[in-house]
Image (cartoon, grey):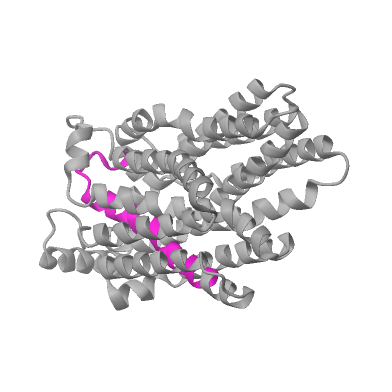
Amino acid sequence: MGPGGNRGWLLRLVIAFSFAQGAVSMARPAVSYRALALGADERAIGVIAGVYALLPLFVAVPLGRRTDQGRCAPLLPVGVVLISGGCALSGLADSLWAMAVWSGVMGLGHLCFVIGAQSLVARQSAPHEQDRNFGHFTIGASLGQLVGPIAAGALIGGRDMAGTSVLALLAAGAGGAVAFASLWRTESPATANSRREQGERVPVQRILRARGVPAGIFISLAVLSATDILTAYLPVVGEQRGIAPALIGVLLSLRAAATIACRLVLTPLLRLLGRTLLLTVTCLLAALLCAGIALPVPVWALAVMLAVLGFCLGVGQPLSMTTVVQAAPEGARSTALALRLTGNRLGQVAAPASAGLVAGLTGVAAPFVMLGALLLVSAGTALRAPARPAGESEGAGKASLSRAILRRKSGI
């Protein structure tokens, strides 16, 4: 099975990613409740959450290098073990420093899984299939992000917050382990053998100078920051406007469902508009909608805005993956994806800190205006993203597509 072949591996990868991401999305709020039960204040919870994002920054590029020079699939079970172990051991921890360590282990496991999985999609997809396959792959993340917090909310509560948060973390660990059931035959022998002959290692500076790589990294950072800050600050907006917490949960779920719907129809949207125009339009519209959340609109209007915003934000992540993969030098695509994930982690640390500072100075609506400005800049950078793989002309792209069709017809 080579690029463009049978896609059973992709379905298994999406299922595994759903369980892995669901475990992380369930564990992260549970970690905060468990830390509160152990006597943590807001600063300690911030440190624990920060360790999740910061620790993987030091290993992202080395993991990408290793994947460029070898197989992708071994990172997947390693990631599942670290995610499940980090979740369960966070529940069993009896001190805040231990919780911080296991939170970092969980973040490291998520990074291992995502680097391995994204590299598999890039390596086993023909160039004209990468947008579609990355879109389908990220449905796994959206499903996990949709179900995980709901499951955590269903388990955590009542008078025994300490006990229920432990139960949620142990359940998250068990749920993450289910991903093992879908990790068989995700990497084809032909793809694995193709990495045996290695060329020179491409310097990071050369990867970052490739046209399209910085744009893809920045777009991904902006979209992820918007999703994180929206999740963190919409409850605060609801509190100020008298919107019940249950209704805020429905609104956030509506946003996540719209993101899934976007990725299901990504292929026809790409045929209609093309990658560059689709990225630019959705980032621009998302910028306007984020700024619009700062306005005192009625709940029904807020629901419509969040649904459209979720749809627009669903475009950025999969297409930024394709942009980075196709712009990166040959033999350095996993490293380029690791650099993209590094940018995501930096955004997860810097964006909430900046939003908190802005909100403290000017009010809770200000972070949404800040997000609007960030997404507006990302719409401009999207115009610099190459529309096809670096070094490939339009004629060469059509020829590549024709060859792929002929291979399928002939059963190669």
Counting from the top left corner in percent of width and height, residue 79 is at: 53, 35
Residues 370 and 258: in front is 370
Identify the main secondary structure in magenta.
Answer: helix
Q: Is residue 389 left or right of residue 82?
A: left
Q: Magenta stretch: residue 338 in it?
A: no
Counting from the top left corner in percent of width and height, residue 353 is at: 48, 40
Residues 361 and 161: in front is 361
Q: Residue at x 35, y 28 (%)?
A: 62
Q: Does the rendering let one see residue 193? A: yes
Residue located farthest toward the right when viewing the structure as drawn: 159
Counting from the top left corner in percent of width and height, residue 126 is at: 29, 58
Res. 265 image quadrant: bottom left
> Which span of residues is magenta-colored?
306-334
Residues 86 and 290: in front is 290
Q: Does the rendering let one see residue 6? A: no
Counting from the top left corner in percent of width and height, residue 159 is at: 88, 42
Q: Is residue 185 above or below residue 365?
A: above
Q: Is residue 262 left or right of residue 146?
A: left
Q: Is residue 15 above or below residue 301?
A: above
Q: Is residue 375 left or right of residue 8?
A: left
Is the C terminus in the top left, top right, bottom left or bottom right quadrant?
bottom left
Res. 130 image quadrant: bottom left
Q: Is residue 343 above or below residue 203?
A: below
Q: Magenta stretch: residue 328 in it?
A: yes
